[in-house]
Structures are given as C-alpha cells and as structure tokens.
Image: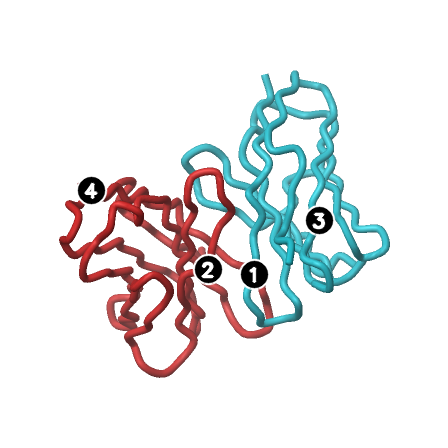
C-alpha cells in the first residue's frame, strides 16, 4: 500500500539549534513530495516540494528538505530553529503528474523552546 | 484576496444527527478538494471537484457522506446520519488548475457525541 510515514509524533529543539523532521515514503514510481505546516488555528500552508532535479529543495521560512531516493526519505530541515517555527508539520506525496490527490503522513509537532 | 474559508469552524452534534460543512474556495479556483483528519491520524483525501463535477470520490468513506458543488463555486459536505467515527477535522483546499499549489482552509472540526 502506498503510504507516508512520519515516525516522530513530536520533535523538541532549542531555539537556534538545527532541526530535522523526518519523513519516509512507500510508493511506486517517482513521487512528488511535499511539506505543509499548520500553525495554531490556521489552515495548512505549503512549505516546499520536490518534483525532479536537485535533491535539496529550499522552501519558505528558511526550511529545506533533502530527497533521498535510496532511503525513500524526504526529511525537513532548518539550520537554526525559531520559537515561531513551533507548529504541526505534514509530509505528503502526490503519486504522479496525472493526479492532484495527496497522501499525507500523520504529522509531527515541532516544539521550539526559547 | 480572500483565502479558502470553511464554516462552521467547530460543530458538536449527537450521533444520528445531520451536519453540513461548507467550503468557499478562492475565487476562480476550479479545483476543490475535501480531506479529513481523524484525531492523531494522517490527513486523508475524500474527494476532488473540477468545477461542479466530481473528478475523484474514491476517498469518500461511505454513503452517509454527500458532497456537492452546485454551480462550481462553494461546496458542501453533508454527513447523514453522523456516527462517532466521523469526528475529526475536515479540510477543504482549492487550486486554480491541475498541478498548481493547493490552498487549504482552516478546517471544520466535527465532534460527534
């Protein structure tokens, strides 16, 4: 079955430290990969996506993600965390170009402490 | 420009009652999607409209769920009769065309008691 896994329910990091939110996927073919963020009382916001090309993708708010085909991973990273980055992060995959349907992971809550 | 708006933000009903959720997409967006997140689980696709037509409704859980998009503008998602397992957050999203960024609403939280 096609799926996305976010193994950590919560990630805690001190402000100024680097952060990583993990995502692995299990799909056939070449997926399109996405990260979305949900701030409290807000809708999901697009952060970044990988379609093809450079494995390191840069997105909004200083976030980046690295596509690793051999490990089927798409971890979200940021060199220096901010308290304002605290939110719920969702990894998602779109199976191919012909569908807009997204398969999401269960989400990871990022807590950045001052 | 207004974003995707959803109403109500929170609804609490009893098992067996009916609830209708509404989504107003961004003006001019032909594509409209419904997703649902049950507590602590992944966000799951429910269905996809292109204008007023259902493009993909493979994620609709059962026939207690009815989605409409009359006139290709706003959409409603009716749950009748509601069951306990229907509790969750229902997200609506829209996009201008295929392969463009999805814009999500804040979600409608449904609690069935």
Same chain assignment for discs 4 and 3 = no
Mark 1 Cα-neighbour bin, 10 Å: few <14, some 14–19, many ≥20: many
Q: Which residue is mark 2?
A: A46
Task: Compute the Cα span from label 1 to label 2.
Answer: 8 Å
Disc 4 to disc 3: CB gap under 8 Å: no
Point out the residue furthest to the front here.
B1
Disc 1 to disc 2: CB gap under 8 Å: yes
Height in image: A48 above or below B7? below
Point out the residue furthest to the bottom here.
A53
Q: Which residue is mark 4?
A: A12
Residue at image position (59%, 67%) is A99
Name which of mark 3 and mark 1 comes first in the sequence.
3
Task: Compute the Cα span from label 3 to label 1.
Answer: 14 Å
Disc 3 to disc 1: CB gap under 8 Å: no
Disc 4 to disc 1: CB gap under 8 Å: no
Residue at image position (40%, 80%) is A52
């Amino acid at each position: 079955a096609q799926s996305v896994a976010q193994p950590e329910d919560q990630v805690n990091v001190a402000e100024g430290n680097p952060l990583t939110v993990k995502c692995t996927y299990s799909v056939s073919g070449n997926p399109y990969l996405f990260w979305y963020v949900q701030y409290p009382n807000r809708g999901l916001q697009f952060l970044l996506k990988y379609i093809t090309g450079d494995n390191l993708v840069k997105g909004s708010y200083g976030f980046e993600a690295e596509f690793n085909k051999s490990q089927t991973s798409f971890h979200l990273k940021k060199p220096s965390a901010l308290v304002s980055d605290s939110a719920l992060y969702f990894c998602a995959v779109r199976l191919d170009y012909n569908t807009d349907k997204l398969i999401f992971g269960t989400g990871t809550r990022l807590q950045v402490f001052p | 420009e207004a974003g995707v708006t959803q109403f109500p933000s929170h609804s609490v009903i009893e098992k067996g009652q009916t609830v209708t959720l509404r989504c107003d997409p961004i003006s001019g967006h032909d594509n409209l999607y419904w997703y649902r997140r049950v507590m602590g689980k992944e966000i799951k696709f429910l269905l996809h409209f292109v204008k007023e037509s259902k493009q993909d409704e493979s994620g609709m859980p059962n026939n207690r769920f009815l989605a409409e998009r009359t006139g290709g503008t706003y959409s409603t998602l009716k749950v009748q009769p509601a069951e306990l397992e229907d509790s969750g957050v229902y997200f609506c999203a829209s996009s201008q065309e295929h392969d463009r960024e999805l814009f999500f609403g804040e979600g409608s939280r449904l609690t069935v008691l």
